[in-house]
Image (cartoon, rainbow, N blue to C red):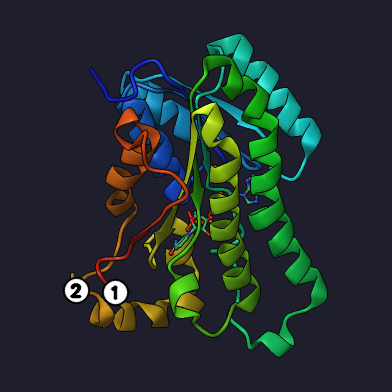
Amino acid sequence: MGRLQGRVAIVTGAAQGIGAAYAKALAREGARTVVTDVIDTQPCVDAINGEGHQAIGMKVDVTSNDDLARMVKEVEAAYGPIEILINNAGLFSHLKLKPFWEIPDEEWDAIMRVNVRGIFQASRAVLPSMEKTGRGKIVNISSATFFLGPPGFLHYVASKAAVIGMTRSMARELGAKKITVNAIAPGLTESEGVQANEGMHGMRAPNRAQRAIGRDMVPEDLLGTLVYLSSPDSDFVTGQTINVDGGKMMW
Ligand SMILES: NC(=O)c1ccc[n+]([C@@H]2O[C@H](COP(=O)([O-])OP(=O)(O)OC[C@H]3O[C@@H](n4cnc5c(N)ncnc54)[C@H](O)[C@@H]3O)[C@@H](O)[C@H]2O)c1
């Protein structure tokens, strides 16, 4: 039996990339998994169901309260109350690196709207449903860029710093409700989006060189941590950020 047998889990931004890997990992552990994104989720849903696990897909923009309300209603009708929320949706792999003084205000606002406000909105939307079961797991996806402060995407680094701050405050506000809130800070990961973005390829060699485990990082490297933070194994762990980057940053 899987470690998440029968639990109801939502992953945002899960049509492809790292989010799709998260959704597949939760489903393999027995979770009834909801794959949400602004793009077509069917290929990911089909892959999960094709492996004999349970998933449904929904079009959900995490910055739309209407979409989120519909999502909660439809998930409860299909699977029952929500127990796990993976806040993965983000604007990242399409970014073009540029010095901060060249970032247009509109681009700054778009990053903050999805990467920061989207997590706040999605978490707020699922909370009443999580409270029904008397337990819950929220996992927010930050980034190891917060620890290093690399040049080229100031808005993104700032947004992922905000995710760590929100994780801590949300953990304190939700502890009494038996809902844990933790963050994962992935290093540069070979998602489809990163592979398609030539501007990011120059970051690979320096990342390999700086890691204790000197190889490229793939989405599968994140799954053990994701499942741990979604499972009862982490019930007394909250407000934490786990850096998964092959031992690049250490302190
Ligand atoms: N790949 C990396 O190196 C890396 C490193 C650290 C953190 N991260 C974070 O991990 C997450 C996934 O990374 P990825 O490389 O797969 O990124 P990606 O850009 O390929 O995927 C992000 C997904 O979010 C979806 N999305 C965008 N806006 C949305 C919205 N408003 N509502 C719902 N969904 C939306 C996209 O459609 C896409 O499927 C992101 O939060 C990213 O910031 C990635």
Q: Which residue is mark 1?
A: 248
The relative height of residue 72 versus residue 12 in the rendered view (above or below) is above
The relative height of residue 44 versus residue 196 in the rendered view (above or below) is above
- Left or right of 78 on screen, residue 184: left
Instruction: Please name the amino acid that badge 1 sits on.
Output: Lys
Q: Which quarter of the rendering shows the N terminus?
A: top left
Q: Is residue 137 visible?
A: no
Could you say where residue 17 lies in the image, as x and y percent from the top left?
Answer: 45, 50
Residue at 73% over, 81% down: 103
**Do labels 1 and 2 touch, CB within 8 Å?**
yes
Which element carries disc 1, helix, strand or loop? loop
| Count of numbered tags | 2
Residue 212 is labelled as 2
Q: Which quarter of the rendering shows the C terminus?
A: bottom left
Q: Is 147 in front, or is 44? A: 147
Q: Is residue 179 visible?
A: yes
Residue at 25% over, 66% down: 246
Which element carries disc 2, helix, strand or loop? loop
Instruction: Please name the amino acid that badge 2 sits on.
Output: Ala
Residue ranking furthest to the left: 213
Distance from disc 1 to disc 2, alpha carbons, whole Å, reads: 6 Å
User: Within the image, what quadrant is residue 69 found in?
Assistant: top right
- Left or right of 137 on screen, residue 227: left
Could you say where residue 162 lies in the image, as x and y percent from the top left?
Answer: 61, 62
